[in-house]
Structure formats: structure tokens, C-alpha cells
Image (cartoon, grey):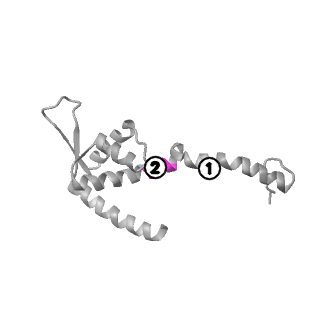
């Protein structure tokens, strides 16, 4: 088995000092996991559940979703949100409704479809199971 190097430090005191100096960088990396693919994929899944949840109550639109997710500490960009909404629409979970009286770039409301309601019911069950096991 290979011995722990501790940054080339020879004695335990200097090793501890090295770890203390290094910890803020490790902590920073953990806090800024947005760049991490795993974090991104899990977060995208959370966002989808969140969107389905709110669309079940009433139609939602892009800027409202951005503000709602920011209220929960997520910094979602439009370049991430709108492709996500299009995928959810393509999957049949959301239906987009454009206001015919507005310009082509007018607000689009997204409502939950029957399929989306079924997906949400399934996800709620799975989230409860996961919560009981993990928390």
C-alpha cells in the first residue's frame, strides 16, 4: 500500500498545516460544483420535478420559473431553462401555449399534460421513498 504523501511534508505537524492550508480550496471546489457534470445532471432533475410541481397548480412561464428557482438558491440561465422546457414539452410532460395576440417572442405559458401529471405522481412517490432512505 502506498503511503500518504501529504504534499511532500515529512512530519505530522507540517502535514496538518498543509491540510489546513488546502482545506479552503477543497471546500471551495465542493461549493462550486456547478461545473461538475454529476451535480449539473442531478440539479437538472430537481429543476424538472420543481417545474412539473408548479405546472400542476397553474400554467408557468420562463421568467417566473427562473425567479422561483432563484428563490430556492438556484442560478439558472435562460440558455439552460428554455432547452429544458422544450425537452419536457417534447417528452409530452408540458404543453406550450403562446398568446396569439403577442409578437412571436411573446410569453409562452407551460401547462402540465396528462402524461406530465402521471410522471409527477410517479416522481413524488420516488422522492418520498428516497427522502425516507437518505434523510
Q: Which residue is mark 2?
A: 41
Q: Which residue is mark 1?
A: 27
Residue 134 versus residue 82 in the image, above or below: below
Magenta stretch: includes residue 11: no
Instruction: Classify mark 2: residues with Cα within 10 Å, few (<14), some (14-19) or many (20+).
Output: few
**Residue segment shown in magenta:** 38-43
Identity of the residue furthest to the top in this view: 103
First in residue order: circle 1 vs circle 2 = 1
Q: Main secondary structure of the magenta part?
A: helix
Identity of the residue furthest to the left in this view: 101
**How far across and down, in percent of the image, does residue 72 sit?**
40, 51
**How far across and down, in percent of the image, does residue 48 sit?**
35, 51
Residue drawn at (79%, 55%) of the image: 4
Identity of the residue furthest to the right in this view: 10
Residue drawn at (29%, 63%) of the image: 121
Image quarter (top left, top right, bottom left or bottom right) of the N terminus: bottom right
Front label number (1 vs 2): 1
Question: Callout 2: helix, strand or loop?
Answer: helix
Residue drawn at (66%, 47%) of the image: 24
Q: Nearer the viewer, residue 68 or 5?
A: 68
**How far across and down, in percent of the image, does residue 109 sit?**
22, 43
Q: Is residue 8 left or right of residue 47?
A: right
Amino acid at each position: 500500500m502506498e503511503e500518504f504523501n501529504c504534499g511532500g511534508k515529512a512530519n505530522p505537524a507540517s502535514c496538518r498545516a498543509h491540510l489546513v492550508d488546502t482545506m479552503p480550496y477543497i471546500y471551495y471546489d465542493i461549493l462550486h460544483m456547478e461545473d461538475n457534470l454529476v451535480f449539473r445532471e442531478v440539479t437538472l432533475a430537481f429543476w424538472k420535478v420543481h417545474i412539473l410541481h408548479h405546472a400542476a397548480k397553474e400554467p408557468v412561464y420562463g421568467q417566473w420559473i427562473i425567479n422561483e428557482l432563484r428563490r430556492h438558491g438556484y442560478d439558472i440561465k435562460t440558455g439552460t431553462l428554455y432547452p429544458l422546457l422544450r425537452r419536457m414539452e417534447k417528452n409530452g410532460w408540458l404543453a406550450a401555449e403562446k398568446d396569439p395576440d403577442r409578437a412571436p417572442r411573446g410569453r409562452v405559458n407551460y401547462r402540465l399534460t396528462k402524461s406530465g401529471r402521471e410522471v409527477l405522481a410517479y416522481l413524488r412517490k420516488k422522492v418520498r421513498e428516497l427522502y425516507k432512505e437518505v434523510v
